[in-house]
Image (cartoon, rainbow, N blue to C red):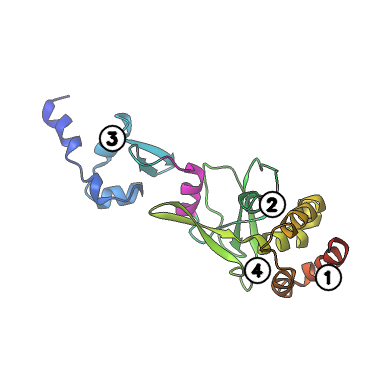
Amino acid sequence: MGSDEGSEVWRVPLGTLPVTFSYSEALGAGLSEWQLYRLRDQGLIVSVGRGLYRRHSAALVDIDLIELARRAPSGTLCLTTALARHGLTDEIPARIDVALPRGRHRPATTAPVSWHWFDPKTYGIGRTELPVDPETSIGLYGPERSIIDAIRLRHHEGSDLAYAALRRWLRRPEASPSKLLMIAREFPRAERPLREALEILL
């Protein structure tokens, strides 16, 4: 390989691309397919999923969350994954729990994911954003919504997960049972068992 061809790689416009970028974004910025693969082979970029790359010099982050944020921009971390993020369970799920609005297509990912489809009418309730890096964030349900989802889906997720999370949350000074019940009114399958649990625990 000639020196001109090798030096061409160093002049590619990586600086015009986001820290994490897709194959099509790279081509759109002026990179050729050969340049892209040469950058990868030289270790200047790393693959974080099929057709998705990240600069090697970028800060260390959770690559799985980066991929999910790019593949499923409307996705939201939920259930056990969200409860673990909020310190409400010691369980470490083998797969990342991600909710999508019902009817939304499930993307193919390298990251291990358990997909869940939630009602679009209530999908945004309690949804926040979790920054993954300065350019990327992913949806995350807050602690109250995560508890409610665990209770309403307790027959699938296990009642121990739901009620242990509720007990741990109630010990926090910022816990507001009235706020929790107000949110639960939007989820009829959760409101009654939540009220019964609170009557026992409070």
Verify CB contact (< 8 Å) between mark 3 and mark 2.
Answer: no
Q: Which residues are magenta?
A: 60-71
Q: Amino acid at mark 1?
A: Arg
On the rendered image, what quadrant is the C terminus found in? bottom right
Kind of residue at badge 3: Leu
Residue position marked by numbered label 2 in the rendering: 88
* Quadrant in the rendering for residue 5: top left
Determine crowd level at label 1: few under 14, some 14-19, many 20+ residues with C-alpha closer than 10 A: some
Name the N-terminal-most of marks 2 and 4.
Answer: 2
Say if mark 2 contacts mark 4, CB within 8 Å: no
| Mark 4 residue element | loop
Per the image, label 2 sits on a secondary structure element best described as: loop
Labels 1 & 3 near each other (Cβ < 8 A): no
Query: Which residue type carries mark 2?
Result: Leu
- The residues tagged by marks 1 and 4 sit, at their Cα atoms, a distance apart of 19 Å
Q: Quadrant of the N terminus?
A: top left
Which residue corresponds to the image point at 20% horizontal and 42% vertical from the top-left? 12
Number of labels in the image equals 4
**Rendering coords of residue 170 (x, y %):** 75, 60
Q: Which residue lies most toward the front here?
A: 173
Residue drawn at point x = 77 percent, y = 72 percent:
188
- Label 4 belongs to which residue? 119
